[in-house]
């Protein structure tokens, strides 16, 4: 069973006095992930019930200064290379085999592809990574899949995928109704599916799916079957699915009714997903019940 350690529970998008870049130990990355927050204003086009972003307290700033962002990332790369980062809490709890730089990830306090600076930010950090010879370090986009066909986003993705890029794209629902209930977005569900299909035909994508207990219930059997039908349709439509990350709530959320599924329930769902999607690599990430 995948186990949480203390470092996994601390995914704050702040690091010391930095405004844009932050380190996390990511289970899905299996190592150190250097996050890039292009939404310091905390504005997002999704309002997921399980989102852990604090939108009660005001944002520190709303602009994106790309020069500062690049300086912050350079500093984090130095700390990772020297090992100094792993001597400070909470990173000193990191498993030895995870004390490695895996990726630079565009994530943060909102949907990164909504930032007008998205393509240039990718281009700058791709150059920074290359200048340091970090050819094994990935560039990862963690996205809600809402803007994958926008021309400026495609420009950024072209650079991302030329520089050890990976696209981790959200799909949490099988039906429009459940999507509205859990992701609470005004973006049409059909657009999400169209974006996944179009992007997946062009580049490999990894699906990210969070199943949770919401208002005392997990996803219904009918919802799971509808979800499997959608993923099967993506495959049939030519989408290059390189894997699926199935996970649940791992950290506290502002919504009290959003709770993690227990490991047994998540395992049962994972078994059904595996049987419905044979041949697709599926990784399962558990909630705080598995804290080491």
Image (cartoon, rainbow, N blue to C red):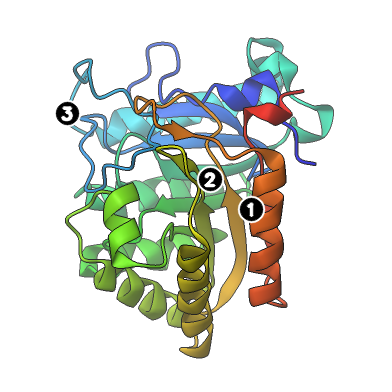
Give the CA distance from mark 3 to mark 2.
Answer: 26 Å
Q: Secondary structure at mark 1?
A: loop
Looking at this view, is 267 or 170 the one in front? 267
Give the CA distance from mark 2 to mark 1.
Answer: 7 Å
Give the x, y percent position of residue 146.
Answer: 28, 61
Please determine whether, in this image, residue 236 is positioned above or below residue 157: below
Please determine whether, in this image, residue 31 is positioned above or below residue 284: above
Q: Earlier in the sequence, mark 3 or mark 2?
A: 3
Residue at position x 51%, y 89% in the image? 236
Quadrant of the snapshot with the N terminus: top right
Q: Earlier in the sequence, mark 3 or mark 1?
A: 3
Instruction: For the residues labelled 2 and 1, say whether their Cβ atoms are less than 8 Å apart.
Output: yes
Q: Secondary structure at mark 3?
A: loop
Q: Secondary structure at mark 2?
A: helix
Write down the quadrant of residue 201 in the picture.
Answer: bottom left
Residue at position x 69%, y 68% in the image? 274
Write down the quadrant of residue 131 in the picture.
Answer: top right
Residue under numbered circle 3: 62
Nearer the viewer's eye, disc 3 or disc 2? 3
Looking at this view, is 133 or 235 the one in front? 235
> Is any atom of residue 291 visible in this view?
yes
Q: In the rendering, which numbered label is found on residue 129?
A: 2
Nearer the viewer's eye, disc 3 or disc 1? 3
Image-based side of 100 in relation to 128, left or right: right
The local crowd at label 2, few if under 14, some if 14 to 19, many if 20 or more residues have their Cα within 10 Å, is many
Residue under numbered circle 1: 135
Write down the quadrant of residue 253 in the picture.
Answer: top left
The local crowd at label 1, few if under 14, some if 14 to 19, many if 20 or more residues have their Cα within 10 Å, is few
């Amino acid at each position: 069973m995948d186990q949480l350690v203390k470092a996994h529970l601390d995914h704050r998008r702040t690091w010391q006095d930095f405004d844009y870049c932050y380190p996390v130990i990511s289970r899905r990355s299996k190592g150190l992930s250097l996050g890039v927050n292009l939404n310091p204003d905390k504005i997002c086009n999704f309002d997921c019930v399980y989102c852990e972003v604090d939108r009660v307290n005001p944002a520190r700033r709303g602009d994106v200064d790309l020069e500062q962002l690049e300086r912050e990332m350079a500093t984090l790369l130095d700390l990772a290379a020297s090992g100094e980062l792993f001597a400070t809490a909470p990173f000193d709890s990191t498993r030895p085999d995870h004390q490695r730089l895996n990726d630079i990830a565009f994530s943060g306090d909102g949907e990164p592809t909504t930032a007008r600076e998205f393509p240039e930010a990718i281009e700058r950090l791709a150059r920074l990574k290359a200048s340091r010879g970090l050819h094994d370090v990935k560039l990862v986009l963690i996205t809600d899949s809402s803007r994958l066909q926008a021309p400026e986003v495609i420009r950024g993705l072209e650079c991302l995928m030329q520089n050890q890029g990976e696209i981790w794209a959200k799909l949490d629902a099988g039906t429009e109704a459940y999507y509205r209930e859990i992701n609470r977005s005004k973006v049409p569900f059909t657009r999400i599916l169209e974006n996944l299909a179009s992007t997946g035909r062009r580049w490999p994508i990894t699906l990210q799916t969070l199943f949770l207990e919401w208002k005392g219930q997990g996803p219904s059997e009918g919802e799971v079957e509808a979800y499997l039908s959608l993923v099967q349709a993506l495959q049939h439509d030519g989408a290059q699915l390189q894997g699926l990350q199935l996970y649940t709530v791992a950290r506290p959320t502002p919504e009290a009714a959003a709770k993690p599924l227990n490991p047994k329930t998540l395992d049962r769902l994972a078994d059904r997903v595996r049987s419905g999607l044979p041949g697709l690599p599926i990784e399962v990430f558990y909630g705080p019940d598995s804290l080491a």
